[in-house]
Amino acid sequence: MGNNKSVLERKATVTRKTGETDITITLNLDGTGKADIHTGIGFFDHMLNSFARHGLFDLSVSVAGDLEVDTHHSIEDTGIVLGQAIKEAVGDKQGIRRFGNFFLPMDETLVLCALDLSGRPYLQSNLELSVPKVGEFDTEMVHEFFYAVSYSSGMNLHLRQFEGQNNHHIIEAAFKAFAKALDEAISYDERITDVLSTKGTL
């Protein structure tokens, strides 16, 4: 699938099949927040639904993974495929703001996401998670998920927790803040007529 996307339709469908997972994701960056999520992990479904809804992305996720082992492969590989879909859907990045950030408050929790669609992957995160699981979701996989997204999309991604005690709130705030920051970064600015870089490419 090529990288030339029309202004009104930035979509991608990516499938990745390994001995551990079989994943297909369809992403429309210019959607309305519709989601059809099936990962086999209830809390993860909730997080991806929140990502789609608050970013106003249309997102379809189908995951068949080795959950009889644990949730690691399913969550990490979903991050890989989602990152690939973001990269493909964004395309050549002409006219977009490139940078995005958002402070997300959720009850006692406050999380910042800041990102740059630079083509240079990096994750910096300081989320403080104090329990091993939320539902059937392994909390240590939050870092692995966002690491996979950042590296497969070529995104510089920062997540900073300023307040928060409840693990559900912290994780959900991170997913929602990521959605809002990404929505800002991919948005068009009529003043930007090419790629927002002194190098001329990203």
Image (cartoon, rainbow, N blue to C red):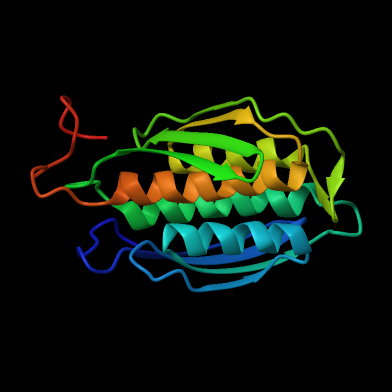
Apparent side of residue 120 relative to residue 147 in the rendered image (left or right): left
Residue occupying image coordinates x 85% and y 55%: 136
Q: Is residue 35 among what the camera can see?
A: yes
Residue 200 appears at what percent x and percent y? Answer: 15, 32
Say which of 134 and 144 sits in front. Answer: 134
Check the image and report above or below for 130 versus 23: above
Check the image and report above or below for 36 versus 148: below
Apparent side of residue 15 relative to residue 1 in the rendered image (left or right): right
Q: Is residue 147 among what the camera can see?
A: no
Say which of 169 and 175 sits in front. Answer: 169
Check the image and report above or below for 65 versus 94: below
Residue 45 appears at what percent x and percent y? Answer: 68, 63
Residue occupying image coordinates x 27% and y 51%: 187
Apparent side of residue 179 relative to residue 133 in the rendered image (left or right): left
Residue occupying image coordinates x 41% and y 35%: 115
Q: Quadrant of the N terminus?
A: bottom left
Residue 124 appears at what percent x and percent y? Answer: 56, 25
Q: Quadrant of residue 164?
A: top right
Residue 193 appears at what percent x and percent y? Answer: 8, 45
Q: In the orientation shown, which residue stands out farthest toward the right?
A: 68
Q: Quadrant of residue 117?
A: top left
Residue occupying image coordinates x 44% and y 57%: 55
Q: Quadrant of the C terminus?
A: top left
